[in-house]
Image: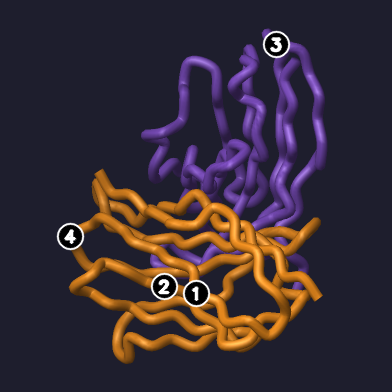
Amino acid sequence: AQSVSQHNHHVILSEAASLELGCNYSYGGTVNLFWYVQYPGQHLQLLLKYFSGDPLVKGIKGFEAEFIKSKFSFNLRKPSVQWSDTAEYFCAVKVFSGGYNKLIFGAGTRLAVHP
Amino acid sequence: EAGVAQSPRYKIIEKRQSVAFWCNPISGHATLYWYQQILGQGPKLLIQFQNNGVVDDSQLPKDRFSAERLKGVDSTLKIQPAKLEDSAVYLCASSPSFLQETQYFGPGTRLLVL
């Protein structure tokens, strides 16, 4: 069955530290990959997405993610985090199954950034 | 552009009671999704509509959950009777079309079943 695994459930960083959140998926077909973010008290919103082409994708607020097909991974990175990046981050994979597209989410990673 | 609207934002009920959630997608979005997000987990798709037709309801517990989107615009999700394990956030999302990659999420309804 298709699944998405996020390795870290909780991450605590100081401001200006670098961030990398792991995401691995299990699906053998063509995938579209997403990172969604949920800031405290707000709804889920798209951070970045990969469909095809350059495997290094840049999103909003200085985030980027790299698709490594051989590793079935789509890790999220940011060189220098800010207190405002405190949020929950979800990796998601869109798969084609049963004649329709389906978005499968990982369990999420809670990031806390301390000033 | 107005986002996806959901109501109520919070609901507390006792087990075996019924509850209904409402969603109004972004204007013009043909595809509507209901997700269940249990604490500590990612959202799980319950049902997907394309206009007023069901595309995927394979993970909807049909013995107690039902959903409709009669006019192809807003939608309701109902639970009857509720169980303790139904405590979760119920998220509604929409996208312009079935093939559109990005889904836009509403604020969710937080349900607590006592």
The residue pinned by badge 1 equals A20
Disc 3 crowd rating (10 Å Cα; few below 14, some 14-19, many 20+) is some
Going by the image, does A35 lie left or right of A70? Answer: right
Letter of the chain in orange: A
The secondary structure type at the circle numbered 2 is: strand
Mark 3 and mark 1: Cα distance apart in space = 41 Å
Nearest-to-viewer mark from 3 and 1: 1
| Labels 3 & 2 near each other (Cβ < 8 A) | no
Name the amino acid type tagged 2. Answer: Asn
Mark 2 and mark 4: Cα distance apart in space = 18 Å
Mark 3 and mark 2: Cα distance apart in space = 40 Å
Return the disc, 2 or 4, that comes first in the chain's sequence: 4
Q: Could you tell me which quadrant the N terminus of chain A lies in?
A: top left
Mark 1 and mark 2: Cα distance apart in space = 7 Å
The residue closer to the viewer here, A113 or A32, is: A113
Letter of the chain in purple: B
The numbered dot on residue A28 is 4
Going by the image, does B99 lie left or right of A39? Answer: left
The residue pinned by badge 2 equals A75
Snapshot quadrant of residue A29: bottom left
The secondary structure type at the circle numbered 1 is: strand
